[in-house]
Amino acid sequence: MRGPHGALAWAELRLVDDVIRKLERIVGLAVTAVLVVLHVVFLAHAGALWRDEVNCVNLATMPLTEVWAHLEFDSLPLAFLALLRGWIGAGLGADLSLRVLGCVLGLGILGVLWWNARRLGYGVPLISLALFGFNVAVVTYGDSVRGHGLGMLTALLTFGLTWELVDRPSARNALLALVSAVVCVHSIFFNAVILLAACAGGAAVALRRGQWKTIGLLAGVGSVSALSLLPYIVVFQSRKAWNFMIEFPVDLQWIWSRFGEAMLLTGPFARWLWIGLVFIGIITVLAASRRGVRGAPGKPGEVGLFCGVALVTGVVAYLLFLLRLSYPMQPWYFLALMALVAACLDGALLAAASTPLRIARIVVAITAIALTLGPVWRSVQVRNTNLDLIAARLAQSSQAGDLILVTPWYLGITFDRYYRGAAEWFTIPPLSTHKLHRFDQVKEAMTSPDTMKPVLSRIETALQAGHRVWWIGGLAVPPEGQGPPVLPPPTEAPWGFEQWPYYLGWGMQASYVLGRHALPPQRVLVPSEAPVSGYENRPLWLIEGWRAGGEVRAANLRGAR
């Protein structure tokens, strides 16, 4: 029996624990409410689809036999394409309806964070909400009409269901984990690493308990999911014909710099906050393990072990995946990793759930939110593209006989979705289709010496007939006193199959003809009600007039960039 002093101390501890729990819940609910508002604001401001989203929509709406044949021209497996196809098939193919799908997935991620918190026993996902939820890339790219939102949602769901399988092994939980895992790896390819990390964390707990059957179930979930990816080998083999054009020599320093750029969207401190909390989480798990914290199933010690092993395995495996991928990398390349790390940190910090640590967790969450709210608020009010505005302007201002040039070529994917005017248009270089990222056709253009001939001829025809040329993008200008560049085939060029020298050279060939035959370009203002993302914020130029020939007036073009 407890003495009066012991009973009093116990009551005080219970009171403190209740106060902290209530505070955690209040902060968590308030943060979630703010995040819901941010997702809705992004829904209202994102506007038209940009090229990666259009590429995905175009692929999803192809005849079924064509989807698989063209899958190499997107970076997604089939799960999101199937979801998107069903969504559009239900009559929800307008831009706003598609944005609603992205928003629903983004809000679903918040729901899964709370669901995981209850399953793993830490109640409120404070660190996940603060670090992950208030990350600019998570909101803006996660809610895009791509597979990122579904990828993060299924990764987090699979993480929680893997713990359910470890905590309460059963055929039902094994089936749920398997179904989630298969959908997870077919949402984005990065999720194969997330599944590996979750299974490694689960195996560590099962090994500690001596539950060999559970380890077998985890191995089965991982193996079946991995085997389900084998059909994509055909897709990867097809990509080999042109994939080397977009590969890039990466190393750990490069990955670190790109990760820093992704974090910089949320603020200069964000990268160090993530790194610092990762180290704290790992140290917490190691300290708890050294003290022999075992606990019954679902207790902090085992949850910490599960999250700690998953965290270390996931970070290492993800780095190896990025090194093997060898792509230049964009902020969304790190979304799946951020989802895993955020989910693991809440559980890892639970391994030594002392009162001071719980209070510190609340303080860190509130501080992180206060520092990130401004950048996130500004980012969710940014338009994804202005090419729909340019397309609408040209539909009104251009006429039959005019010529529209779009550079670089990949902007034609967005322009093709929105332009409904009478004027003929080409990309630079001209491609036969503008529905997908057809790098195979770009490769063919790079090997042909006459790639730009139809475009250059069409420029002269339009100007000579008194029509106008509209130029979307930057104007590349030949050096003063020089003629248009002659581009050797990639096999003879010092830069090989690197794309940008060709983009620049093709643009100079077109601008040379304009400088030789036309009046100086005029900038056409296309106002936007909101700031526009740098990925697709392009200028519009009008070039008209005709003279038979003469020296290229490069100075007149030089400011048109």
Image: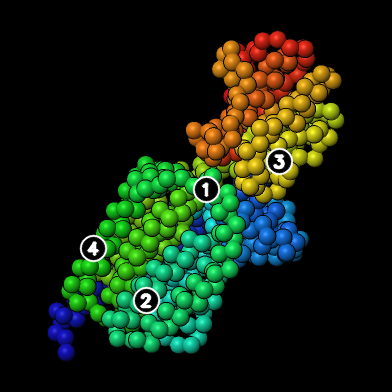
Measured as percent of width and height from the top left, residue 93 is found at 73, 56
Q: Secondary structure at mark 2?
A: helix
* Residue 535 versus residue 468 in the image, above or below: below
Question: Which amino acid type is marked by label 3?
Answer: Leu
- In the picture of the structure, the residue carrying the numbered disc 2 is 202
Q: Dot 3: within a 10 Å radius of its alpha carbon, few (fewer than 14), some, or many (20 or more) residues?
A: some
Q: Is residue 94 visible?
A: yes
Tell me the quarter of the image containing the N terminus. bottom left
Give the CA separation, mark 1 to mark 4: 41 Å
- In the picture of the structure, the residue carrying the numbered disc 4 is 283
Question: Which amino acid type is marked by label 1?
Answer: Phe
Q: Secondary structure at mark 4?
A: helix
Q: Dot 4: within a 10 Å radius of its alpha carbon, few (fewer than 14), some, or many (20 or more) residues?
A: some
Q: Earlier in the sequence, mark 2 or mark 1?
A: 2
- In the picture of the structure, the residue carrying the numbered disc 1 is 244
User: Looking at the rendered structure, which numbered label has been put on residue 431?
Assistant: 3
Give the CA separation, mark 3 to mark 1: 20 Å
* Residue 393 versus residue 418 in the image, above or below: above
Give the CA separation, mark 2 to mark 1: 37 Å
Which one is closest to the eye, mark 1 or mark 4? 1
Which residue shows up at 73% across the image and 64% down it? Answer: 65
Which one is closest to the eye, mark 3 or mark 2? 3
Q: Dot 2: within a 10 Å radius of its alpha carbon, few (fewer than 14), some, or many (20 or more) residues?
A: many
Which residue shows up at 77% across the image and 12% down it? Answer: 548
- Give the quadrant of residue 283: bottom left
Question: Which amino acid type is marked by label 4?
Answer: Ile
Q: Earlier in the sequence, mark 3 or mark 2?
A: 2
